[in-house]
Image (spheres, helix red, strand yellow):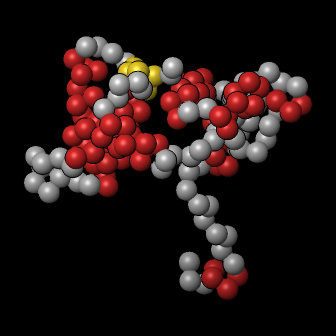
């Protein structure tokens, strides 16, 4: 069973810190407390990964809320595995990962995301980075709106 990497725990904590900032600089939201407990144990025991089995329920709920805010797939709609490549030039996933993606659990998907991000060789990280950018694209400025810009 795949493990959750400490960087994903950190990202989830930061997600909740932005969403529910401390009112007094000391008090933490319940989601942050739950994730911080896991994070602190990982740091204390010098662990980079934690098995998702046995993950505390409140921490899992907080992690899943963060996970659901992330892009579902690394696909940038340029799939070279359909042309016979073992590793997709567009997203960096292997043929097997592309085929099994819909059935992967969140930890498996995050492990794949981590690997392709670290490798950083796929077009999603260079040639077509703008296509992979998170968030909606800016609408083009029309002639009518050009005067306002």
Residue at x 56%, y 51% (from the top left corner): 134
Q: Position of residue 136 (x, y in %)?
A: 59, 60
In this picture, residue 58 sits left or right of residue 119: left
Quarter placement of the C terminus: bottom right
Q: How many marks?
A: 0
- To which quarter of the image does residue 141 belong? bottom right
Give the percent coordinates (x, y) of residue 116: 61, 27
Name the residue furthest right.
83
Snapshot quadrant of residue 80: top right
Classify residue 46 as left or right of residue 110: left
* Vertical order, 10 against 47 (above or below): below
Question: In x, y percent, where is residue 101?
Answer: 67, 34
- Give whichever of 18, 110 is nearer the camera: 110
Q: Seen in the image, is 63 located left or right of residue 136?
A: left
In front here: 66 or 89?
66
Tell me what residue is drawn at x 42 percent, y 26 percent: 52
Look at the image and tell me whether residue 107 can be seen.
Answer: yes
Residue sitting at x 50%, y 30%: 107
Identify the residue shown where x is 70% and y is 82%: 143
Q: Position of residue 49 (x, y in %)?
A: 40, 20
Q: Is residue 10 visible?
A: no
Quarter of the image where one finds residue 123: top right
């Amino acid at each position: 069973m795949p493990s959750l990497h400490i960087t994903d725990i950190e990202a989830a904590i930061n997600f909740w810190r932005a969403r529910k900032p401390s009112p007094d600089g000391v008090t933490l939201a319940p989601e942050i407390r739950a994730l911080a407990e896991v994070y602190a144990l990982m740091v204390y025991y010098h662990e980079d990964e934690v098995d998702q089995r046995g993950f505390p329920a409140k921490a899992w709920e907080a992690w899943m809320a963060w996970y659901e805010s992330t892009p579902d797939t690394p696909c940038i709609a340029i799939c070279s595995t359909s042309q016979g490549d073992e590793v997709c030039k567009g997203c960096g996933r292997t043929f097997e990962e592309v085929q099994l993606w819909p059935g992967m659990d969140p930890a498996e998907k995050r492990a794949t995301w981590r690997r392709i991000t670290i490798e950083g060789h796929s077009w999603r990280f260079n040639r077509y980075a703008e296509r992979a950018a998170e968030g909606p694209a800016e609408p083009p400025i029309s002639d009518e709106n050009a005067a306002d810009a």
